Amino acid sequence: MGKDYYRTLGLSRGASSDDVRRAYRRQALRFHPDKNKEPGAEERFKEVAEAYDVLSDPKKREIFDKYGEEGLKGGTPSSGPGGVPNGPTFTYTFRGDPHAMFAEFFDGRNPFDTFFVQRNGDDEDEEPFTTFHVGFPRAREAAARRQDPPVLYDLKVSLEEIYSGCTKKMKISHKRLNPDGKTDKPHGVFRREGSDIVYPAKISLREALCGCTVHTPTLDGRTIPMVFQDILKPGVKRRIPGEGLPLPRAPEQRGDLVIEFEVRFPDRIPAPARSLLEQILPL
């Protein structure tokens, strides 16, 4: 036999939409795992959410009233010989999050933080937000006030701190992003590009043409000698894998250390050298 959503919420079939909302509020508060630690409360909390999901939706409720849970979920209702020839084509499966539904119902507020009294020692038949202690005049305001939006704080960290990890004490304040949209502290050596760090290596024109060794610093204080024998054009980049910053979604992996070459050109060339270069260098 299928589920009886009306029975789950303690309602009759003629219940109004307001009755459904009140019943869900009452049952959800009763079986919420934060309040009810009895075995089976979590499962009952889910059943209450499913019942409210169906009965608060006019289309789902109409199909349930006609065909029951079996018809609602795509099966053939058990009532009537031979089944129902013109059964519903609507198929329902509860895929919601009972806790998200609860939070949305109460506008993100925690109803268990609100001061309220119970009549006759029983909260099942009362609205938990209608009878407040007269000694707490602000309780009504707290119940009506919605949760404030989250506070976003721009925490500035150095590249070394991102590289090695750190603990920070925060002071909440309003900050503007840098023009590039980042909030890292300016670094004296490196530039950040996502999880990569860029080291600008300044080399001479001779080194760019004839090869050179670049002693590349790392964020943890090491130096990696990199030998280059090919021609290095201005702006060309070379990568040292795994020497960058931790990846946001995989901290055990790291980005790269990128060497970006800046070629220093001479301000002038002596006449003999100029003639020699004209003979050697291709057009």
Image (cartoon, rainbow, N blue to C red):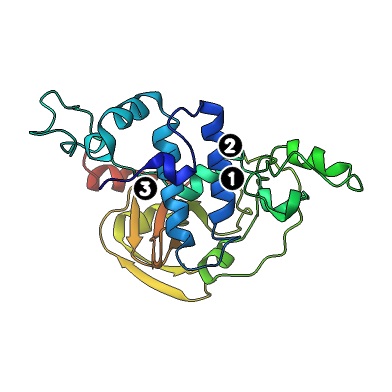
- Dot 3 or dot 2: first in sequence order is 2
Side of 68 where 163 appears, left or right: right
Query: Which quadrant holds the C terminus?
Result: top left
Q: CA distance from mark 3 to mark 2?
A: 96 Å
Whether pointer 3 and pointer 1 mark residues with C-beta atoms closer than 8 Å, the reply is: no
108 over 57 or under it: above or below: below
Q: Kindly identify which residue carries mark 3.
A: 272
Q: Kindly identify which residue carries mark 1.
A: 26
Where residue 72 appears, x then y in whole percent? 26, 35
Residue drawn at point x = 58 percent, y = 36 percent? 22
Whether pointer 2 and pointer 1 mark residues with C-beta atoms closer than 8 Å, the reply is: yes
Q: Kindly identify which residue carries mark 2.
A: 22
- Nearer the observer, 207 or 28: 28
Residue drawn at point x = 64 percent, y = 44 percent? 125
- Nearer the observer, 256 or 120: 120
Circle 2: residue type? Arg
Where residue 275 appears, x then y in whole percent? 31, 43
Mark number displayed over residue 126: none
Residue 166: quarter of image: bottom right
Circle 3: residue type? Pro
